[in-house]
Amino acid sequence: MSLLVLLCILNIATATAAHLRPGFYSESCPEAELIVREVMKKAMIKEPRSGASVMRLQFHDCFVNGCDASLLLDDTPNMLGEKLALSNINSLRSFEVIDQVKEALEKSCPETVSCADIIIMASRDAVALSGGPDWEVKLGRKDSLTASQEDSNNIMPSPRSNASFLVDLFNQFNLSVKDLVALSGSHSIGQGRCFSIMFRLYNQSGTGRPDPAIEPKYRNRLNKLCPLNVDQNVTGDLDATPEIFDNQYFKDLVSGRGFLNSDETLFTYPRTRKFVQVYSNDQIKFFKDFAKAMIKMGDLQSGRPGEIRRNCRMVNSRSVDTLLES
Ligand code: HEM
Ligand SMILES: *[C@@H]1O[C@H](CO)[C@@H](O)[C@H](O)[C@H]1NC(C)=O
Ligand SMILES: *[C@@H]1O[C@H](CO)[C@@H](O)[C@H](O)[C@H]1NC(C)=O
Ligand SMILES: *[C@@H]1O[C@H](CO)[C@@H](O)[C@H](O)[C@H]1NC(C)=O
Ligand SMILES: *[C@@H]1O[C@H](CO)[C@@H](O)[C@H](O)[C@H]1NC(C)=O
């Protein structure tokens, strides 16, 4: 990744950020948060995993030029969107749930609630509805007029990442070591593909051997799930209780049962290990720190011009030039 490019993006970020606050829609759309929660509830009854998939969208949106719903834009003839970026292709899912939320909101309060805020509210709801913490979100974001596949490719971390790399990456977003470990606890719900762990199982760091940090019985299970000739879209659970948001994820890391390399390395690396230990013994502290870190991540903004999209998948029909001139 080019550090210089990243720093440039972040500098713009602080230039003209919108003021985010709780209750932003209390006059313009008082039912907004209730509507989002209702749609999320229905979606998660239909498919429990959709909660995890929606919550992941906040991370992949906010890290790439701020929380601006750039992630939700479909490709156009002139623009390669972020959906097909390296970390997203064949992996991000449940975009249709965001569409359902948007549709419900457009019915009650047309052209009022941004798609960027929908991601933030829906992610909070996904956690709360899975047994995790609930918290007050800050709102008032605008939706981007463009997206960047290249920026996503440069920024989003691979499942091979080690903790020292992740500490540096999160630090560039003003997220502390504690924030990194707490946010990784999002992997308390959801699934990952064999594609994301094949190297760990068969050729860690090019050694031709598995990652020695994997507990042997768990490794046997993963080997059965993901044999060398497997369809690498097959998925496995990120922790032992993949539909419940709890601190099981951290207990699993302590016993060598982290699914991704980026998970287990949080326990093998000294600077992150102590937080893993604390959260594995103290779910309440994990919940508190997780909510705080989600709010911090939700504060990331690009400072670029934006709009309230009518359809989260495309910008409103008006040229960027007109907008910049007005
Ligand atoms: C710390 C760096 C992180 C890395 C390297 C990482 C990487 C990954 C990978 C590789 C997967 C599985 C994708 C697949 O195999 O298709 C995944 C799933 C997931 N990630 Fe992360 N992630 C990180 C942080 C986060 C954060 C900060 C959040 C949210 C706050 C998050 C939420 C999720 C969720 C909920 C899933 C499961 C999604 C589903 O079941 O559809 N991750 N992550
Ligand atoms: C962590 O990953 C980075 C980047 O891939 C690499 O340069 C570094 O040597 C790794 N550190 C450790 C301790 O393995
Ligand atoms: C991080 O914090 C510093 C100091 O408060 C600030 O100048 C910088 O803009 C922040 N970066 C981001 C990405 O928020
Ligand atoms: C393991 O990875 C290394 C380095 O990427 C590569 O040279 C080697 O061929 C791989 N071995 C196997 C068995 O795939
Ligand atoms: C997963 O499925 C998609 C869509 O069917 C396919 O294009 C892709 O190649 C598959 N990926 C892997 C890693 O097998």
Image (cartoon, rainbow, N blue to C red):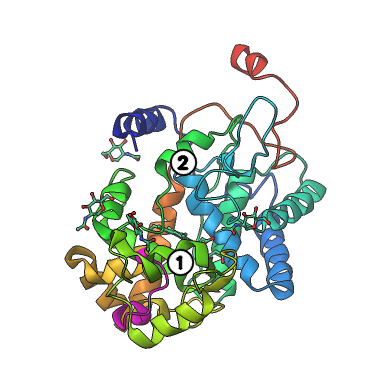
Q: Name the residue under label 1.
A: 186
Viewed as shown, does residue 4 lie left or right of 43? left
Direction from residue 32 to residue 239 in the image, left or right: left
What is the secondary structure assignment of the residue under circle 1? helix
Residue 218 placement: quadrant: bottom left
Say if residue 311 shows up in the picture. Answer: yes
How many C-alpha atoms fall within 10 Å of the one at disc 2: few (<14), some, or many (≥20)?
some
Q: Is residue 123 above or below residue 212?
A: above
In the rendered structure, does residue 255 fall within the stretch colored magenta? yes
Name the amino acid type tagged 2. Asn
Magenta stretch: give its range. 251-261
- Mark before the other along the chain sequence, 2 or 1: 2
For the residue pair 126 and 1, the one nearer the viewer reads as 1
Ligand 1 within 8 A of label 1's CB?
A: yes
The reply to whether the C-beta atoms of the residues labelled 2 and 1 are less than 8 Å apart is no
> To which residue does mark 2 refer?
153
